[in-house]
Image (cartoon, grey):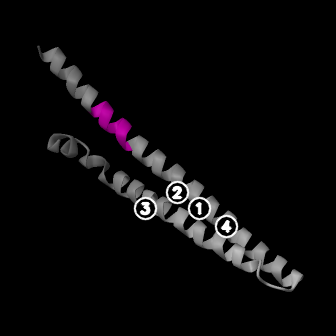
Amino acid sequence: MSRIYALNRPELSIIVCGSIAAMFQGCIFPSIAILFGEVLGAFAIEDVEDQKDEINYWIIIIVCVGAIAGCCSFLMVYLFTWSGERLTFRIRIMAFTAMLRE
């Protein structure tokens, strides 16, 4: 296992960036729950116009958080896939050269 880690060292920065994107992605769903609670709390406002304004505000925030979630998800998948492809290529080259040596 430590040999795999050593082979993956050149992509360490890619893996760290992918991990940061995964961390943000993990924070998105609890924040959406909190924002959805704010929307439900806005239904308690008695004035209809104030209620509409408050709900529209929170819905726009939820849509923005959803867009951020999409970007983080894309980055996470892209970076981890890129790192995995490079590692797989490196291992296949090593296996092929070992076969040619025999």
Mark 1 against mark 4, which lies toward the viewer?
A: 4
Horizontally, residue 45 falls left or right of residue 74, namely right
Secondary structure of residue under mark 3: helix
Mark found first going from the N terminus, 4 or 3: 3
Amino acid type shown at disc 4: Ile
Secondary structure of residue under mark 2: helix
Q: Residue 92 at x, y = what percent?
A: 27, 26
Per the rendered image, the range of residues in magenta is 83-90
Q: Which mark is residue 72?
A: 2
Label tally: 4
Dots 2, 1 in contact, CB < 8 A:
yes
Dots 1, 4 in contact, CB < 8 A:
no
Secondary structure of residue under mark 4: helix
Mark found first going from the N terminus, 4 or 2: 4
Q: Residue at x 59, y 67 (%)?
A: 33
Task: Please state, as top left, top right, bottom left or bottom right, where the N terminus lies in the image.
Answer: top left
Which residue corresponds to mark 1? 68
Amino acid type shown at disc 3: Met
Which residue corresponds to mark 3? 23
